């Protein structure tokens, strides 16, 4: 069934085929959404849904209401299309939504689910997960305050990519988290940790 691919290609040309003047993003989001409604079971329709939310959630931090309204449609997609190759991308959109809504732990969990459901070719010698490890670890530490998850992914980065340029920062993050936990065990407020180590 080639018609949905042709429809998607026409929208994508309008989306990516010009720089000036900028495209009408609202119209593009509407067209992507309509394509999905016409062909929800077709890969082209599902890609259209992903592109729709990429537009609508581009600046989600400034539009938490848009993020909140997006969640039901994204979760419905996951339920309706459990075998879709776009599961990972939709889960990343959900991570963006929850981050915009001020729910960093929920955002972190969706980010991890997106990573775990990605399409990965284990036979590819050039496959590199270091960026994903780094992103998840930093979100866990600095946004969610989930040191257990942060440690897990910083350690994965260190053990699997020992020559990565971010290794020094990963080791420092592990050391700092240890110091923060010691500071808290001694009765300190984690928000005062940096001041505490200066004294």
Image: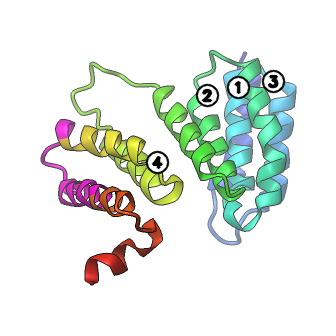
Q: Are marks 1 and 2 in contact (CB under 8 Å)?
A: yes
Count of number-bearing discs: 4
Compared with residue 23, is residue 50 higher up or lower down, i.e. above or below? above
Membership of 162 in magenta stretch? yes
The magenta stretch is 159-178
Q: Name which of mark 3 and mark 4 comes first in the sequence.
A: 3
Membership of 90 in magenta stretch? no
Asked which secondary structure carries label 1, the reply is helix
Residue 10 placed where, x, y %? 73, 42
Compared with residue 132, is residue 77 higher up or lower down, i.e. above or below? above
Kindly report the distance in space between the C-alpha atoms of the residues bearing marks 4 and 2: 24 Å
The structure residue drawn at horizontal position 62% and vertical position 43%, both measured from the top left corner, is: 106
Q: Provide the major secondary structure of the magenta segment.
A: helix
Q: Quadrant of the C terminus?
A: bottom left
77 relative position to 160: left or right: right
Q: Nearer the viewer, mark 4 or mark 1?
A: 4
Depth check, front residue: 176 or 86: 176
User: Which residue was labeled with disc 3?
Assistant: 39
Residue 180, quarter of the rendered image: bottom left
Q: Name which of mark 3 and mark 2 comes first in the sequence.
A: 3
Q: Name which of mark 1 and mark 2 comes first in the sequence.
A: 1
Residue 31 placed where, x, y %? 83, 44
Q: Name which of mark 1 and mark 3 comes first in the sequence.
A: 3
User: Which residue was labeled with disc 4?
Assistant: 146
Point out the residue furthest to the left here.
Answer: 163
Depth check, front residue: 152 or 2: 152
Kindly report the distance in space between the C-alpha atoms of the residues bearing marks 3 and 4: 40 Å
Disc ID at residue 22: none
> Badge 4: how crowded within 10 Å, few (<14), some, or many (20+)?
some
User: Which residue was labeled with disc 2?
Assistant: 87
Q: Nearer the viewer, mark 4 or mark 2?
A: 4
User: Which residue was labeled with disc 1?
Assistant: 78
């Amino acid at each position: 069934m080639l018609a949905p691919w042709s429809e998607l290609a026409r929208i994508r040309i309008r989306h990516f085929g010009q720089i000036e003047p900028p495209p009408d993003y609202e119209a593009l989001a509407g067209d992507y959404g309509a394509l999905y409604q016409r062909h929800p079971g077709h890969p082209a329709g599902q890609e259209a849904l992903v592109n729709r939310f990429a537009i609508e959630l581009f600046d989600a931090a400034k539009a938490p209401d848009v993020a909140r309204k997006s969640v039901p449609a994204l979760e419905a997609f996951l339920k309706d299309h459990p075998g879709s190759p776009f599961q990972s991308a939709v889960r990343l959109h959900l991570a963006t939504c929850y981050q915009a809504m001020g729910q960093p732990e929920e955002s972190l969990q969706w980010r991890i689910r997106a990573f775990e459901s990605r399409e990965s070719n284990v036979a590819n010698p050039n496959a590199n997960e270091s960026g994903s490890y780094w992103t998840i670890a930093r979100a866990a530490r600095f946004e969610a305050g989930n040191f257990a998850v942060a440690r897990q992914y910083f350690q994965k980065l260190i053990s699997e990519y020992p020559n990565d340029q971010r290794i020094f920062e990963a080791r420092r993050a592990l050391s700092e988290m240890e110091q923060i936990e010691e500071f808290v065990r001694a009765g300190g407020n984690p928000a005062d940790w940096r001041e505490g180590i200066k004294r």
